[in-house]
Image (cartoon, coloured by chain):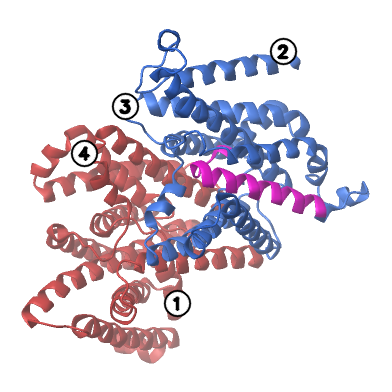
């Protein structure tokens, strides 16, 4: 098991390297050496390229992990923060704090967003509880609709307060605005993703159901709330820094579970690596395909992710029937 | 014939009463829309609002009828053409057409010809998609809805992608197609859309008896001697045409049809299409024209109607889907 993981890490490093050297300004080893430390190439590398690549890795890994976490806790393969209303609620919270307390620091805004995300997710769980017979596919359906309703409220308020541009910016993930000083919140999100890894065994147990968890002497409620807090904080930091990345938390954990099953502790490193790699590839593609212009990553991931999700849905069905 | 139906069938009597009440409300809404808060020259006001009204009525009729047909054909009350990604598909086709021909060539082209091409493409693609989804293997309803929603996202992202590749400077202009607005109706398409829509409505009227039979379920309908496949295909063609009409005029709206169709089912209390379709159309007109009037004149908002419809429709959907799973 060690060797494939090592290979995957090497692959990620190569992708990160490519990501550093793709862009309008010519940054190469040669320009870096000839330009010296104060040269233009070095400046671009330090202020723009390195932060961007780091942001991609952090956001990709944490979003994928939060998707996995959510799937374990809701016990459904087809949910992620973007399909149960977590991200949309975070956007609503962010919008409200931006309107009413525009001067508050980013960190406070992020916390308010996370609170709203937590409330939205709790609302979703509450609605789910009102449904006695749960069909596997109904859970994401209700979630997508709830996301739509919350997004409509957000749009309405944004429209009244002339904030549409900001909300649209959150809606579509885009890493082109990432510079030094504007992505560091993602480290906080990533720290929570690591926390999820540390507590992975608990979530694996919680994923077996309430009765099983209680039998093993764990406080089921506390584990689930802990998990939801982590997911909400991750969603909120990613939203503040780069906007929504659709389907990432859905597709990556599913692919990993197809390869190696449902033990979360074993799956987490793979989910993180694959999530980061997926985002890196999509971003590099978006930057190359219409050089020197960029296609935002939300659009690229939207195409690739929805196609993959469709494949998962229809393939799964064929196997059952 | 109608009089006889009224005297014998209590359901038909109820449907007639509902229809008359709705017609009255629709007329009042229209009157308010045309006259409230009008300042300046009447001929100007009437002309300006008249075109907008015509657009709203066309869109309401197209969405309402296509949703009722679609629900009958797919035999459930949750699916609508837009939930299944129909209008996203239309936008994708439009984007592809512009991408392959070039936007300059397209703007020089006759808009009706372009529209014709788009509708034909739409028929072909939606026909293929629906054959694949509905005919062949049995699939669960929830799977279908989920697949439809994801297809919608896929089509939307793909058109976004193609638009970005096209020309970064024109992107902003093209992006307007993404946002539905009942406030800006494409005037150049109005007359042509009206002709197409009336044709589709007449076609629907000719199908109406057979649609009632389709409602009884596939096996019963075939037993009763109905050419099931042909009826379903015709209904789907009408749906595709109507979705193209409404999407071309105001852009995509996800939940409006669902809202109108489920209200119509509830109000009429019978499954007869001869009542169902007019009721749905009238409800649609009341919602759009009345809603627009209230928003514009009472609250002085501008384009927020589609947002409110989306909000209410989403709630309706959650309610419907929860009630459905409870009933089982």
Q: Is there one chain holding both mark 2 and mark 3? A: yes
In the rendered image, residue A232 lying in the magenta stretch gets the answer yes
Q: Residues within 10 Å of mark 4 (few under 14, many from 20)?
A: many
Which quadrant of the structure image shows residue A4?
top right
| Left or right: where B179 falls relative to B316 | left
The answer to whether dots 3 and 1 both sit on one chain is no
Magenta stretch: dominant SS?
A: helix
Viewer-nearest of labels 3 and 1?
3
Q: Please report, as a chain letter, where disc 1 is located.
A: B
Cα–Cα span, label 1 and label 2:
66 Å
**Label 4 vs label 3, nearer the camera:** 3
Q: Of callouts 2 and 3, which one flags the residue occurring earlier in the amino acid sequence?
A: 2
Disc 4 marks which residue? B98
Q: Position of residue B3 (x, y in %)?
A: 30, 89
- What chain does badge 4 belong to? B
* Residue at 59% from the left image edge and 41% from the top image edge: A185
N-term-proximal mark, 4 vs 1: 4
Q: Which of the 4 image quarters holds residue A296?
A: top left
The colour assigned to chain A within the rendered structure = blue
Residue A41 forms part of the magenta stretch: no
Q: Which residue is mark 3?
A: A290
Q: Could you tell me which secondary element the residue under label 2 belongs to?
A: helix
Label 2: how many residues lie within 10 Å, few (<14), some (14-19) or many (20+)? Answer: few
Q: Position of residue B203 (x, y in %)?
A: 24, 62
Position in image of residue A178 (x %, y %): 47, 35
Residue position for label 2: A3
């Amino acid at each position: 098991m060690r060797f494939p993981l090592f290979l995957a890490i090497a692959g990620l490093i190569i992708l990160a390297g490519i990501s550093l050297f793709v862009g309008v300004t010519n940054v190469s080893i040669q320009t870096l050496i000839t330009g010296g430390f104060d040269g233009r190439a070095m400046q671009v590398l330090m202020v723009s390229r390195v932060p961007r690549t780091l942001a991609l890795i952090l956001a990709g890994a944490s979003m994928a992990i939060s998707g996995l976490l959510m799937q374990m806790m809701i016990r459904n393969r087809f949910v992620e923060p973007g399909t149960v209303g977590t991200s949309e609620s975070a956007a609503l919270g962010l919008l409200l704090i931006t309107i009413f307390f525009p001067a508050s620091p980013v960190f406070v805004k992020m916390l308010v967003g996370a609170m709203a995300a937590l409330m939205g997710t709790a609302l979703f769980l509450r609605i789910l509880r009102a449904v006695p017979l749960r069909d596997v596919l109904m859970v994401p359906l209700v979630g997508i609709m709830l996301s739509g309703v919350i997004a409509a409220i957000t749009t309405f308020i944004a429209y009244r307060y002339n904030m549409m541009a900001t909300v649209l910016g959150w809606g579509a993930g885009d890493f082109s605005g990432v510079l030094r000083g504007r992505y560091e919140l993602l480290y906080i999100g990533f720290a929570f993703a690591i926390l999820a890894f540390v507590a992975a065994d608990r979530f694996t147990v919680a994923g077996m159901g309430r009765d099983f968890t209680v039998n093993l002497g764990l406080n089921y409620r506390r584990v689930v709330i802990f998990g939801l807090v982590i997911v909400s904080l991750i969603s909120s930091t990613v939203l503040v820094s780069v906007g929504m990345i659709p389907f990432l938390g859905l597709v990556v954990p599913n692919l990993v579970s197809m390869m190696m099953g449902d033990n979360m502790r074993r799956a987490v490193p793979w989910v993180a690596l694959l999530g980061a790699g997926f985002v890196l590839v999509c971003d590099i593609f978006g930057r190359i395909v219409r050089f020197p212009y960029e296609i935002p990553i939300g659009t690229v991931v939207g195409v690739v992710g929805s196609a993959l999700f469709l494949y998962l849905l229809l393939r799964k069905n064929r196997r059952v029937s | 014939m109608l009089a006889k139906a009224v005297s014998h069938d209590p359901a038909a009597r109820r449907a007639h009463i509902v229809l008359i009440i709705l017609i009255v409300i629709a007329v009042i809404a229209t009157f308010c829309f045309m006259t409230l808060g009008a300042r300046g020259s009447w001929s100007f006001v009437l002309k300006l609002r008249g075109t907008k009204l015509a657009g709203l009525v066309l869109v309401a009729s197209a969405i309402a009828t296509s949703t009722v047909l679609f629900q009958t054909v797919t035999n459930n009350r949750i699916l609508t053409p837009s939930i299944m990604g129909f209008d996203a598909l239309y936008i994708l086709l439009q984007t592809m057409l512009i991408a392959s021909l070039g936007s300059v060539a397209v703007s020089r082209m006759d808009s009706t010809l372009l529209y014709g091409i788009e509708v034909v493409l739409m028929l072909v693609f939606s026909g293929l998609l629906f054959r694949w989804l509905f005919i062949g293997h049995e699939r669960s309803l929830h799977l279908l809805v989920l697949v439809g929603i994801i297809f919608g996202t896929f089509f939307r992202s793909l058109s976004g992608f193609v638009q970005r590749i096209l020309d970064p400077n024109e992107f902003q202009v093209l992006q307007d197609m993404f946002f539905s607005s009942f406030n800006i109706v494409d005037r150049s398409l109005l007359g042509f859309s009206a002709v197409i829509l009336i044709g589709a409505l007449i076609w629907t009227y000719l199908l109406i008896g057979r649609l009632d039979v389709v409602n009884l379920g596939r096996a019963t309908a075939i037993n009763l001697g109905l050419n099931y496949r042909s009826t379903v295909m015709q209904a789907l063609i009408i749906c595709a045409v109507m979705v193209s009409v409404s999407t071309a005029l105001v852009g995509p709206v996800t939940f409006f049809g669902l809202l109108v169709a489920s209200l119509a089912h509830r109000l009429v209390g019978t499954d007869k299409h001869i009542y169902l379709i007019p009721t749905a159309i009238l409800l649609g007109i009341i919602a759009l024209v009345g809603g627009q009037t209230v928003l514009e004149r009472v609250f002085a908002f501008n384009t927020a109607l589609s947002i409110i419809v989306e909000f209410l429709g989403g709630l309706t959907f959650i309610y419907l889907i929860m009630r459905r799973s409870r009933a089982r």
